[in-house]
Amino acid sequence: MTAAAPALAGLVRRLESIGPLTAAEREAVADLPVAIRTLPPRCPIVREGERPGQCCVVLQGWLCRSNVLSSGKRQIHSLHIAGDMPDLQSLHLPVMDHNLDTLTPALVAAIPHEALRDLLASYPSVAAVLWRGTLIDAAMVRQWMVCLGRRAALEHTGHLLCEMYLRQQAAGLAAGFQCPLPITQSDLGDALGLSTVHVNRVLQSLRAMGLITLQSGTLRIHDWRRLVALSEFDPTYLHREDAPA
């Protein structure tokens, strides 16, 4: 493998959580050419209306996809952690219809579209795994729509916390019902469609119920089953067979 292999180990892990890869396929993914960038919080990676020539892989930190209204109000419609490739759609949809930004300090790798196209042409099974990953992303978007439109703030927040724990567990970033949650309450509000004040009240309520604590960027879930029941969280849409009961 080339020097790029350690950088893309998270991407390989993410793909293998979606579907099996052969040793040759793992090596081909790990050997993709990358340009690595260290970025500060709230740094734009791709803007709405741009025509990117590469896809981004998150190596460290948290990113988000969002749209911003003329009033300045922002709606975050997905959160991304290490191993994610949040703008894979740019490989086939040339014009970005949303923004991709860092939420925390982040390390990202840019992979040229041409290199990705060559990989997918040479390894159709990798293309199938990426396609399955895209379908899972779409399933998450549907759940976010249901939560935004129909769940009360307490249930919606609990649902998001359950999702982010399981996603980080799959990425090897969480265990023992504890995981990083390094984003601000303002960012949570933009993801949940709530004001910062409302987010604070909901988090305090979840804490008072003995379900979670959130301190110094670390989420601790004290009663997984009760949080799941409260949030009506069904992990089926994440398509993982090893989710905790």
Image (cartoon, rainbow, N blue to C red):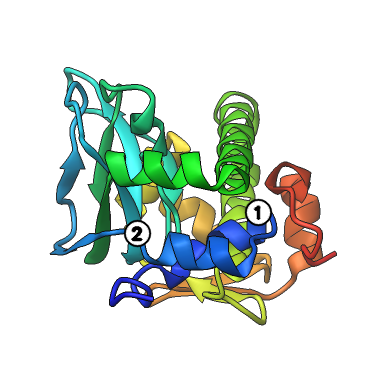
Name the residue at the bottom extreme.
Answer: 176
Callout in the foreground (2, 1): 2
In-front residue for pair 152/140: 140
Visible residue check, residue 207: no
Image: 146 above or below 43: above
Task: Quote the CA–CA distance across marks 2 and 1.
Answer: 19 Å
Measured as percent of width and height from the top left, residue 88 is found at 40, 39
Q: Would residue 97 be found to the left or right of residue 170 on screen? A: left
In-front residue for pair 103/15: 15
* Amino acid of disc 2: Leu
- Mark earlier in primary sequence (2, 1): 1
Q: What secondary structure is marked by label 2? A: loop
Q: Which residue is mark 1?
A: 18
Q: Which residue is mark 2?
A: 32
Measured as percent of width and height from the top left, residue 61 is found at 32, 65
Identify the residue at horizontal 53%, vertical 74% (top origin).
179
